[in-house]
Image (spheres, grey):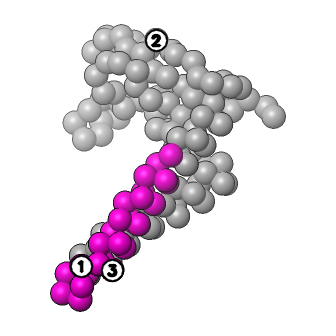
């Protein structure tokens, strides 16, 4: 499969019970070896909550700017705050429901970018 001029393939990862584990992978296309980090569900949840808090801070700063900028330029702050408020809610709901993207569970530790992740190929341990 070719996606955006990059060769892609799928890897199956087992999510660890706690913390994270590093996996060495060799690309079947360019034969380069690189390392990925596979996080546990709790680490992925903390990561989502961190991003939600970052989005919340940006939205709050936009609202504060909108309040203090006056009527002429206040809309700039509110228009900045609106999408980041949506992103905050989206990340919080996904963190509470336990819905994770492949990029929440698996990240590159080093090496060039490869598209290898599919959310249906990530297996969670039995709880």
Residue 48 x, y percent position in the rendering: 53, 46
As drawn, 43 above or below 69: above
The answer to whether residue 35 is left or right of residue 38 is left
Q: Which residue is drawn at 31% across and 18% down?
A: 111
Query: Residue 69, labelled with which disc?
Result: 1
Res. 79 in view: no
SS for dot 1: loop
Residues at badges 3 and 1 in contact (C-beta under 8 Å)?
Answer: yes
Given the current orientation, which residue lies at the most extreme left position?
Answer: 72
For the residue pair 56 and 84, the one nearer the viewer reads as 56
Q: Is residue 71 magenta?
A: yes
Residue 24, numbered label: 2
Dot 2: element: strand
Please, which residue is most extreme toward the bottom here?
A: 71
Identify the residue under disc 3: 67
- 83 relative position to 48: left or right: left
Q: Where is residue 24 in the image (x, y as percent from the top left)?
A: 46, 11
Where is 35 relative to 12, above or below? above
Q: Does the magenta stretch include residue 23?
A: no
Give the magenta range. Answer: 50-74
**What's the distance in space between the residues labelled 2 and 3, CA to CA?**
51 Å
Q: Is residue 94 above or below residue 13?
A: below
- Which image quadrant: the C terminus? top right
């Amino acid at each position: 499969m070719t996606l955006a001029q990059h060769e892609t393939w799928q890897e199956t990862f087992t999510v660890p019970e706690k913390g994270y584990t590093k996996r060495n992978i060799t690309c079947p296309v360019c034969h380069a070896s690189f390392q990925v980090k596979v996080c546990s569900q709790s680490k992925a949840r903390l990561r989502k909550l961190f991003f939600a808090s970052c989005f919340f801070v940006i939205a709050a700063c936009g609202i504060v700017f909108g309040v203090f900028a006056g009527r002429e330029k206040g809309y700039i702050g509110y228009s900045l705050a609106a999408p980041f408020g949506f992103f905050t809610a989206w990340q919080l709901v996904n963190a509470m429901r336990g819905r994770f993207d492949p990029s929440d569970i698996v990240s590159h530790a080093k090496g060039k970018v490869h598209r290898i992740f599919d959310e249906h190929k990530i297996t969670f341990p039995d709880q």
